[in-house]
Image: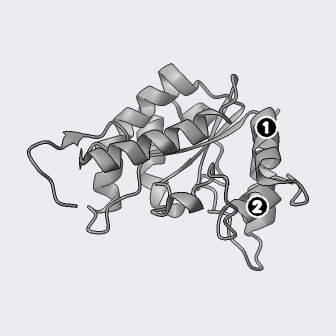
Amino acid sequence: MLTTATDLPCDGCGLPASPEHIAERVRRLELCTQFRPIHLNVLFVALAPPVRAEEDFYSPENCKDFVEPFLETLEIPSTMEKPARLAEFQRRGYYLSYLSECPLPEKKEPVAATIARLGPTLIRRIRFNYRPKQIAPMGQELIPLVEMLRAAGIGPILTLEHGLVLPIPRTGPGQWMELFRRSVTAAAP
């Protein structure tokens, strides 16, 4: 991403951002806000949203790569339309957030550096905004974030599987679905 003198830092990713980037962040924020529960039972945290806005979890379009397996694992029926499925996700007190609220640039910094840069912002959002009962980090790249959350005193509400972050829901065979479901069921009231 080329930066210009008029670019301002984005509050979602912390990087210099064009007006188009800010507009896209606001659009994504509007989509996810309509499905945010008042009381969060489980806050799912992933690294960053997909680059294509139509593949975002909260977008109206269906995305088979992440959305379908994630909602299927949580036993939210695929027979429902996506807005109804997201409403059920919300009703259960679930919310998906990202360490970086914007897609990461292609020429990105190492994940550990991204976590070190954005982790304190996520911790503030958790403490003062989200206030969840449980936090379920998803994806092996977030292992350093777990240590940061523990150091901040948030460790007791982490939902982990034998000390490890939960796997990213995906299509295909594997034991990940049962592992993910068991971990979330144990955390959810």
Q: Which residue is mark 2?
A: 179
Q: Quadrant of residue 91?
A: top right
Residue drawn at point x = 77 percent, y = 65 percent: 177
Residue 180, placed above or below residue 145: below
Q: Which residue is mark 1?
A: 188
| Marks 1 & 2, CB-CB < 8 Å contact | no
Q: Nearer the viewer, residue 90 or 46?
A: 90
Residue drawn at point x = 77 percent, y = 72 percent: 175
Q: Identify which amino acid the numbered label 1 is placed on.
A: Ala
Residue drawn at point x = 76 percent, y = 76 percent: 174
What x and y, as percent, mark residue 172? Answer: 74, 79
What x and y, as percent, mark residue 100? Answer: 41, 47
Residue drawn at point x = 52 percent, y = 31 percent: 154
What is the CA distance from the residue labelled 1 to the residue labelled 2?
14 Å
- In the shown orientation, is residue 33 left or right of residue 91? left
Q: What SS does tag 1 mark?
A: loop
Q: What SS does tag 2 mark?
A: helix
Q: Quadrant of residue 81?
A: bottom right
What x and y, as percent, mark residue 23? Answer: 38, 43
Q: Identify which amino acid the numbered label 2 is placed on.
A: Leu
Quadrant of the snapshot with the C terminus: top right
Circle 1: is it few (<14), some (14-19), or many (20+) Cα within 10 Å?
some
Residue 121 visible in image: yes
